[in-house]
Image (spheres, helix red, strand yellow):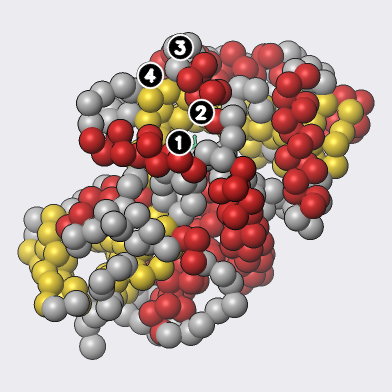
Amino acid sequence: MKPTVVIGGGVVGLFTAYFLQQQGEEVIVVDQGDMEENCSTGNAGMIVPSHIVPLASPGMISKGISWMFSSKSPFYIQPRLDRRLIDWCLQFYRHSNAKHVQQSIPYLKGISLYSKQLYLDFVAAHGNEAIKLQDRGLLMLYKTKEGEKDEAALAQLARENGLHADILSKEEIRTLEPNQEVDVRGGVYFPDDAHLSPKDLYRLLKNHLKDQGVTLKSNVTITGIEKGGSKVKAVITQEGKIDCDHLMVCAGAWSGEIAKMLGFRMPMMAGKGYSFELPNMPELKQASILTEARVSQSPYGDKVRFGGTMEISNHVDKINICRVEGIFESIKAYYPEFQAVFPSEDKIWKGMRPCSPDGLPYIGKAPGWENVAFGAGHSMMGVSLAPATGKILADLKTGKIGTLKTDAFAVGRYVR
Ligand SMILES: Cc1cc2nc3c(=O)[nH]c(=O)nc-3n(C[C@H](O)[C@H](O)[C@H](O)COP(=O)(O)OP(=O)(O)OC[C@H]3O[C@@H](n4cnc5c(N)ncnc54)[C@H](O)[C@@H]3O)c2cc1C
């Protein structure tokens, strides 16, 4: 029997390998990078069942356009004549409506709650010392009247869909954040959200997989695919070919290129974001999103990580320092007493979020291929949804039929 090859050793690829291995499969994970740093290591580590509204939603287009004119804003599309980008933007525009949001909610809610449970199971099996999962909710902070209106509407929507959401006054927020002033109008608290240390999770997954006999091949790029009828026979790399029985594509922002090798269209853009860690002084206790600035804040005891911005851009390696300044300036705006010192450039992390144009991931069988499946395009929720995605793909391989509805995540939904 030939192995199952997983393309991409990000958090989605590793969780896919994790569940495949648990089912007794022989697995090889192949990654073009060093498997030390990728989008899955420096993110905010939030597990967010509260995030039931996809990125493509009403109001995003007008907000996005207004942000385009500020060098420090949280969103930017580098204008260029690129057919893929134009196609992606058109699809994003088509999906930014109330009907798409309503249709997406049950799917996002279902997969998010499933994934959160899998994280709790993971902690029960592996302990919590390594990944530092803090199951203590997420606070959406707002400073403006408009922000209050938007967040209250999201809280209402969450409640209508059976999730817990509490609207908190500034004074109530003080009890969650006792060490310093929080300069806001109020916030919405989602008690069922959580956060963890993504880098430690990544390290634990890698070590566990190696111990269980999974082969991890770093610095190996998939450059082609050997096909036979409706099956993939092998992947081609710069080091030769690797025969496979099944292929799982978890190649993050690059997954659209693998779809192209397989002959179908799967729109995907990279949404670059940045993060940096600072000493946590005075200590922030509660994970939060500074909503007007679109900045995440994840505390880990003596350190805290701030992250944000979404640059739809090609420049993988370049750090746009203005955007990082935008993140940095928001810290004092929300936490005026926090001792923030601007990080040196070598301490700034960047990652490329895999963004589908409708804000929903691609999970399931590849159209026209008997032995290929994809798990990609999770945008801002790749960590949150990685265990569920990996489990769905592993179950698909063994023919297990789950009860979770996943048809909205169909990999072939853009095939014409
Ligand atoms: C600032 C920031 C904050 C974030 N915060 C959160 C958060 O709080 N919660 C959350 O859930 N998500 C968050 N995210 C998003 C999350 O980081 C991503 O959704 C997630 O890491 C994507 O994981 P992935 O495995 O799909 O992709 P990746 O981690 O990008 O892994 C894909 C891998 O595929 C490899 N690859 C690609 N093409 C090939 C090829 N041809 N051959 C071999 N290998 C290949 C790449 O080298 C890469 O390592 C954040 C992102 C950013 C930028």
On the image, which quarter does residue 30 sit in? bottom left
Residue at mark 1 to residue at mark 2: CA–CA distance: 7 Å
Few, some or many residues within 10 Å of mark 2 (<14, 14–19, 20+) = some
Few, some or many residues within 10 Å of mark 4 (<14, 14–19, 20+) = some
Residue at mark 4 to residue at mark 2: CA–CA distance: 22 Å
Residue at mark 4 to residue at mark 1: CA–CA distance: 26 Å
Give the mark nearest the N terminus, 4 or 1: 1
Q: Is residue 12 left or right of residue 258?
A: right
Depth check: 122 or 153 in front?
153
Q: Which mark is residue 61?
A: 2
Q: Position of residue 413 (x, y in %)?
A: 38, 59
Few, some or many residues within 10 Å of mark 3 (<14, 14–19, 20+) = few
Check disc 3 and give the amino acid type: Phe
Give the mark nearest the N terminus, 1 or 2: 2
Q: Is residue 270 left or right of residue 221?
A: right
Mark 1 lies on residue: 93
Badge 3 element: loop
Mark 3 lies on residue: 69
Q: Marks 2 and 3: which is nearer the front?
A: 2
Mark 4 lies on residue: 320
Q: Position of residue 275 (x, y in %)?
A: 49, 30
Residue at mark 2 to residue at mark 3: CA–CA distance: 13 Å
Q: Are marks 1 and 2 in contact (CB under 8 Å)?
A: yes
Q: Marks 4 and 1: which is nearer the front?
A: 1
Residue at mark 3 to residue at mark 4: CA–CA distance: 15 Å
Give the mark nearest the N terminus, 3 or 4: 3
- Residue at image point 31% right, 80% down: 26
Badge 4 element: loop
Check disc 2 and give the amino acid type: Ile
Q: Quadrant of the C terminus?
A: bottom left
